Amino acid sequence: DEEAPKMYNEKPNILITGTPGVGKTTLARLLCEYVDSLTYVNVGDLIKEKKLYKKWDEEFDVPIFDEDMVCDELEPYMQQGGMVIDFHTSGFFPQRWFNLVVLLRCNNTDLYDRLKARGYAEKKITENIECEILEVTSEEVYDSYDSDVIVQLHNEKESDMQNNINIIIERLKMWKAQKDA
Ligand code: DAT
């Protein structure tokens, strides 16, 4: 999709990505509370609601989503702009969609505790932590998006959340200033 033209939406589209448990949903929802013009979209929920899958993963009991179905469903919303997309994987989204890509990170100890608290089975916890250690999500982000739209943020302590919100809001102001220039 690299050849596709950039979209000239009035409102920015933001991707919030990272390994499950890093705090995407918490941060994305909070961001949408702070900035009125933004709309929160949980892609995992959307996949289930709109049945954007053709197969089911029995081992992990999750739908194996269909990338084209997800992109087709989201495209009209992305055209509108102002979407905050919350999903753990991002390489299949058109690059042109996003004006800001937030990659959230969390250390293994906190990540373990969060996934355990979520009631995940040990195997699922291990898989997710390995994903974070091996930088699977991070590599996907850097392979898929321009480095100038990516912001990598640590989300470990409670106080990180407000800091991260402030950083994102600053980046959105920069985006707007560049767009209006
Ligand atoms: P994700 O959407 O990436 O799976 P989440 O937003 O559901 O993650 O957060 C996972 C858990 O971690 C949830 O119980 C809230 C908690 N959490 C998120 N950010 C935190 C932070 N900065 N400090 C402490 N706990 C946090």
Image (tube, rainbow, N blue to C red):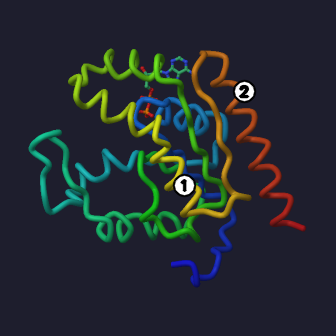
Badge 1 or badge 2: first in the primary sequence: 1
Out of 82 and 99, give the one closest to the viewer.
99
Q: Is residue 126 left or right of residue 176?
A: left
Q: What residue is shown at x 68% (from left), y 32% (from top)? A: 164
SS at badge 2:
helix
Q: Position of residue 180 (x, y in %)?
A: 85, 66
Q: Position of residue 18 (x, y in %)?
A: 49, 41
The residue beneath circle 2 is: 163
Q: What residue is shown at x 53% (from left), y 28% (from top)? A: 106
Out of 6 and 90, give the one closest to the viewer.
90
The residue beneath circle 1 is: 141
Do callouts 1 and 2 mark residues in contact (Cβ within 8 Å)? no
Q: Residues within 10 Å of mark 1 (few under 14, many from 20)?
A: many
Out of 123 and 67, give the one closest to the viewer.
123
Q: What distance separates the C-alpha of mark 1 from that of mark 2?
A: 22 Å
Disc 1 C-beta below 8 A from ligand 1: no
170 shown above or below 47? above
Q: Position of residue 96 (x, y in %)?
A: 58, 71
Q: Position of residue 156 (x, y in %)?
A: 57, 21
Quarter-of-image position of residue 71: bottom left
* Three-letter code for the amino acid on which mark 1 is drawn: Val
65 shown above or below 36? below
Quadrant in which the C terminus appears: bottom right
Q: How many marks?
A: 2
